[in-house]
Amino acid sequence: MKDFSLSMDPLPLAEGEEIVWSAAKYKGFFRKRKVWEAVVTNHRIFEYDWENKRMIVCCLLEDAEPVVERTWRVRRSTWGGPVVYRRGFGVYGGYGKSRYVTVGILSIVANGRVVARWEIEDPRGLQRLIKTVKKQMREKAKAASGRNR
């Protein structure tokens, strides 16, 4: 009897650290496995290599500055249904759905150099999210230092 349990190793997070955003790349068709993951938490930004179980890039959130390099629009569509061709004539029946999304390159700059570059959907949204989390963490730290006086 085979054991079909999945080993879902957790990401190496510190105490009190929460994932705010993540994106992953997978390999395999029948046996999909996660090979790479980009993660933004409330304390840091990092890339994790799941095959070698190590961090590729890591920087503190307070040192990171998200920069949108460029953006473009892409049509994401889903079409399906049978197609019958007979001597050059075609019959198509099916369904369709399409939408346009903004895709772009978001670079994470820390200490004057680019530490990560991701091609993602809605890079401006992630840029705003990172800036908002940074602001919240600064306000939380300021409030905590005010209470300790």
Image (cartoon, rainbow, N blue to C red):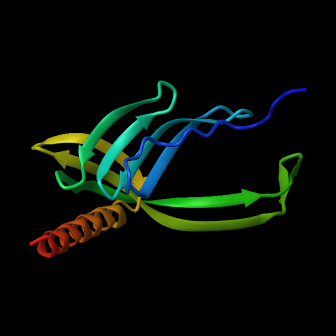
Q: Nearer the viewer, residue 15 or 87?
A: 15
Picture coordinates of residue 58 (x, y %)? Answer: 29, 40
Determine whether, in the image, residue 118 is placed left or right of residue 99.
left
Looking at the picture, does residue 130 appear above or below residue 30? below
Q: Nearer the viewer, residue 67 or 18?
A: 18
Which residue is at the far front? 149
Tell me what residue is drawn at x 61 percent, y 40 percent. Answer: 8
Tell me what residue is drawn at x 71 percent, y 32 percent. Answer: 31
Total number of numbered discs in the rendering = 0
Which quarter of the rendering shows the N terminus? top right
Tell me what residue is drawn at x 67 percent, y 67 percent. Answer: 97
Looking at the picture, does residue 63 appear above or below residue 98? above
Determine whether, in the image, residue 90 is placed left or right of residue 20.
right
Determine whether, in the image, residue 134 is placed left or right of residue 103.
left
Q: Nearer the viewer, residue 102 or 88?
A: 102
Picture coordinates of residue 82 (x, y %)? Answer: 86, 54
Picture coordinates of residue 38 (x, y %)? Answer: 41, 45
Which quarter of the rendering shows the C terminus? bottom left
Where is residue 73, by image quadrant? bottom left
